[in-house]
Amino acid sequence: MIESLLVANRGEIARRIIRTAKRLGIRVIAVHSEADADLPFVAEADEAVLIGPPNPAQSYRNTEAILAAAKSTGAQAIHPGYGFLSENAEFARTVEASGLIWVGPDADAITAMGDKINARNLMAAAGVPVAPGTTDPAADLDAAVTAAAEMGYPVMVKAAAGGGGMGMGVAVDEAALRTEYDKVRAFAERMFGDGSVLIERYFPRVRHVEVQILGLADGRVVALGERECSVQRRNQKLVEESPSPAVSPELRSRLLAAAVRAGEAVGYRNAGTVECLFDPATGEFFFLEMNTRLQVEHPVTEYVYGIDLVEEQLRVASGLAPTFDPDALTSSGHAIEMRINAEDPKRFLPGPGVIRTWVEPTGEGVRVDSGYTEGNTVTPFYDSLLAKLIVSGATRDEVLDRAKAAVAAFQIEGPKNNVPFFTELLDNEEFRSGAYDTGIVSRMR
């Protein structure tokens, strides 16, 4: 097993990785910006290194500073968490070229799946269903208009190098497409350094369902069930649950088999997620993208499968067998995760500030993965995620009832936060029935 680990991230995911690593007897090094010096993850690591000012480009995306911290502390491996450098193939190559262990998929897999057009083409060749769309970037606006006319409106305009729900726009006609194309291309160039755009058929009433995969040290790829991620605002997830209330045993079998084929197509190792769109009206599902990292919502899978995904990541990176029998995977129960963000619960606009009160819920089946505590300052420099409230139980109904009680007990004063939104959602009949789709939040608003 790896003996020393540098966590190249911050907040709740850094604490999450630190918790498992310390349980396994691994020495943990945290890196942090000046803005994060007082956050819990810094104090909980065995050693902490300041790597730069608040701007992520000068700290959490500063590869030279992170590698220097690894060298000065004698770290053996680097875990990137999610976001920041987690899907940066060049960073992964540099880490390994420096003689360190990269706790994630290899750089070639990250590269192959990082470009949405290339990923779509790879998946189609592997027999994974993909939605109608362009097989090459739309070189210019005329090419986008032609492609959209061929597949029919509405269409989704997407940044080929995008991710995390960023760099997308929906066009219902040619006039809207002309606006969205320029907007998405400009955003993609600014955010990802790549203005390539693809055009996909847009499905207005679909569900966002994803499959957790794990590429093992012996070369096998296994699927650890699915997660429902349809409660979203601005194409970004707010709630995830497993199993999906929309997925039948027959559909689950097809979904998981397709996800395994996706992983095998790129020789995948370590944790990853195959994201799909599911159309309940037709029973069809389509490959959306593959996230070559640990997902924010991994805890719901941990509950229903009874495993620690961070431990499995570390075991794969160490060349060790998993803690479970890959030929006897079973799931039980239900779990829901709610992302507690520092944002207005109506318009979902960021609301940083000093946390005056922070009281986490407790009780059977309740887990809180938090990045902050009372007295900390939520700054405007990073993602608005404060904590993840994860609730588990034997049935979905039991979990919904526990979730209501847990949300009611979660007290946060200071920064704006979306806890009231979850109170509203858990009373929403569409959500409670399980028959919801990606438009549920907009219908609530």
Image: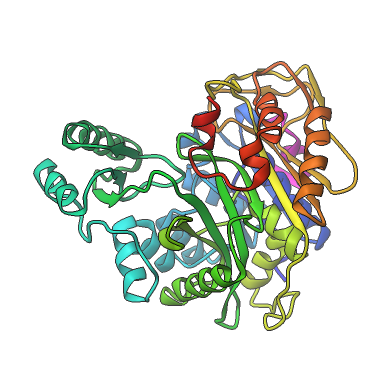
Provide residue 412's location: percent of width, then percent of height: 76, 22
Q: Nearer the viewer, residue 294 or 131?
A: 131
Q: Which of 314 and 283 is in front in this view?
A: 283
Give the total of numbered labels: 0
Which quarter of the rendered picture does the N terminus lie within? bottom right
Between 421 and 300, the one nearer to me in the picture: 421
Of residues 336 and 323, the one drawn nearer to the viewer in this rendering? 336
Left or right of residue 173, residue 3 in this image: right
Q: Does the magenta stretch include residue 196?
A: no
Give the residue furthest to the left. 142
What residue sits 77% from the left and 16% below the top? 356
Residue that appears at 46% across and 77% down: 264
How are the residues colored?
rainbow
Res. 27 in view? yes
Q: Is residue 298 above or below residue 170?
A: below
Q: Is residue 71 visible?
A: no
**Residue 396: % across, % down:** 75, 51
Specify whether 92 is left or right of 421.
left
Which span is picked out in magenta? 37-49
Q: Position of residue 82 (x, y in %)?
A: 56, 49
**Place of residue 29 in the rendered image (x, y in percent of width and height, measured from the top left):** 69, 49
Q: Residue at 90% x, 42% y: name it.
A: 363
